[in-house]
Image (cartoon, grey):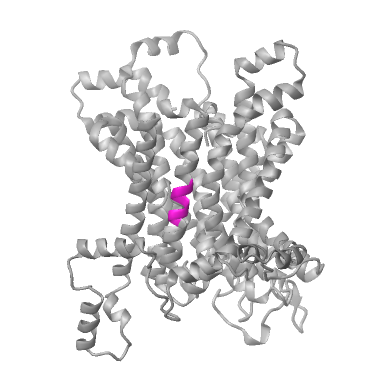
Amino acid sequence: MFNYITRRVLLAFLVIIGVTLLTFISIYMAGDPAVLYVSERAGPEEVEEARRRLGLDRPLPEQYLSFLASLARGDLGNSMANRVPALGLVLERLPATLELTFGALIISNLIAIPIGLISAIKRGTRTDGTIMLVAMLGQSMPGFWLGIMLILFFSVTLRWFPVSGHVPVLLPILQGEFETAATNFPRALHHMVLPVITLSVFTIARNARLVRSALLEVLGQEYVTTARAKGLSERRVIITHALRNALIPIVTIVALEFGFLLSGVIVTESVFAWPGVGRLVYTAIGQRDIPVVQAAVVFFALVFVTLNLVVDILYAYLDPRIRLN
Amino acid sequence: MAQSNSTAVLNPENATNDLVALPKPPPTHIRAARSLIKQRYPLIALFILILVIVLAIFGPTIAPKDPNRQDLFARLLPPLTPDRTGVVNFPLGTDSLGRDVLSRLIYGASISLAVGVIAVSIGGTVGTLLGLIAGYFGGAIDDLIMRIADVQLAFPFILLAIMVLVVLGQGVFNLVLILGVGQWVVYARVARGQVISQREKDYVEALRAIGARDARIMFIGILPNILAPLIVIASFNVAGVILSEASLSFLGLGVPPHVPTWGSMLAESRDQLLGGKWWLAVFPGLAIMMTTLSLNIMGDWLRDFLDPRLRGNF
């Protein structure tokens, strides 16, 4: 177990080095950072001055280390558009994004697991075929297109749901204003319906297929035959014996899913004008506000890597087969 | 298939079996055609893909209009709107600049498909090569390649693509390159696993015994035997890359604005949503969906046809 954890921590560390190195290099790919920093009319002396002040005249490895040092302090540079710390902007928008991601995470698993289960039990039937075809359709659609279609149909034509916008729930909770959160809740849900569907369709489709194939594999195992031979009802066999084991690979996927949802959130938030990190990135892309994009990417990366690490260790703890492999 | 040929030649045991027992199975392309006709979906998918490929190649000849010609007197026309003489000039309507949606859709096919195919070729070639090397030689080089793969896999690639494209600026070249780089890991992993399972086989031993060089054993001996799963992955992968291209174009990071692609058409449709201009969003989205769905169905079929044991692996 100790070896396993050491290996995983080391890998997480390598990933962080990789991501930060790429971020660091990308600062240079954009052109001379000193030139970007000063105003357009600045002369060569001013550029040199800025270069010295920003430490850009030092050797690159040294610059990378100081980049890491400021990263450790939570300093990811200032937004070019309004000169405030980029990381601050990201954190400010985080609660709205988390509402959306958690919503999608919960909904997608609530739907995907039963669907996959039904499909596996009815393997080879028309029900199974239809479910799998629909799942494949869900995986073949650009998520944002579904969002656009939902807006066209449910918001513009039927007027059931708002076209865009967001009512905060998580933010008031974090600030201790529970009453505001409670009064906001129904309206918040109303605003969340379409974005959450948009964000979770791909995940639902993929997880349903995964649950189905994991379950089919488990159902062929000898212990399932034993359980059946003991005279257990098919329901017991599937729920207490098969599904439990089939869900093991799904658990790891959920962690990876989170990272996937974080990237899906960028397009979803831009479709629904949802004021989260994703929309911040979208706006920053339009303004070529590189520090903000970098801050968001590095932040997402760190969250993703940490989450992955925790889940992997938890997973190895729960299932000894993993750490021995 | 490649596998039976090379083992038959190099492995005398198999060769005699082939001669004695079973009647010769029909050639691969005949079996493929039979399997396609028997199942409906893959056949429909293949038909759609051929249509898209034809549109992509002959787009400029087929498209009724110049995709960038603006007609300010015919802006935002719904599909099938007849003009004063009763002629339908724009079957799928026009966009906010009066450009023909149908023509843009046809031109878009070539960009979307080209980006998908080229990026997958880059990723597939690099990945397969690295996987072959890692699996064949093992040791330190294997560790190095697979650790890099782990690192890349431990991170949602689209985020890196966004960061790099914001910095480098948009353009077809950058887009294809970054999407290609994003794909190598899956090929490397699968190729490596397959090579390891082939490395100890008799035919590899035989090649070694006749003094073949490593490169010859890898490319002429092993590679044909491990192609099946890689081809299956590539088919799913083209679909994935087309979706990524659409997302990046939607974010304004794809090809430059005047180049019509399905993703950028969707991005432009966003502004016309509230006005209910549905045709701007429906048609490019359908085009993307039909293409990726067909690729995924074909991938499924290919997997079952080439090697049913792969079912459930991807």
From the top left corner, tell me how far across and down residue B150 is, in percent. Answer: 38, 43
Which quadrant of the figure contains the N terminus of chain A? Answer: top left
Which quadrant of the figure contains the C terminus of chain A? Answer: top left
From the top left corner, tell me how far across and down residue B90 is, in percent. Answer: 68, 74
Compared across the picture, whether A65 is left or right of B123 comes to left
Q: Residue furthest top?
A: B20
Q: Residue at x 45, y 81 (%)?
A: A82
Note whether A17 is above or below B233 in the view shown. Answer: below
Q: Residue at x 57, y 41 (%)?
A: B298
From the top left corner, tell me how far across and down residue B194 is, in percent. Answer: 39, 29
Where, by quadrant of the figure, is residue A121 drawn?
A: top right
Residue A153 vs residue B113, the one in the foreground: A153
Dominant secondary-structure state across the stretch colored magenta: helix
Q: Residue at x 52, y 74 (%)?
A: A283
Let me know if residue B125 is in the magenta part: no
Compared across the picture, whether B172 is left or right of B90 comes to left
From the top left corner, tell me how far across and down residue B288 is, in percent. Answer: 60, 57
Q: Please indicate, yes or no, whether residue B61 appears anywhere in the rendered image.
A: no
Note whether A40 is above or below B100 in the view shown. Answer: below
Compared across the picture, whether A301 is left or right of B247 comes to left
Compared across the picture, whether A171 is left or right of A79 comes to right
Magenta residues, as a range? Answer: A301-307
Q: Please indicate, yes or no, whether residue B151 appears anywhere in the rendered image.
A: yes
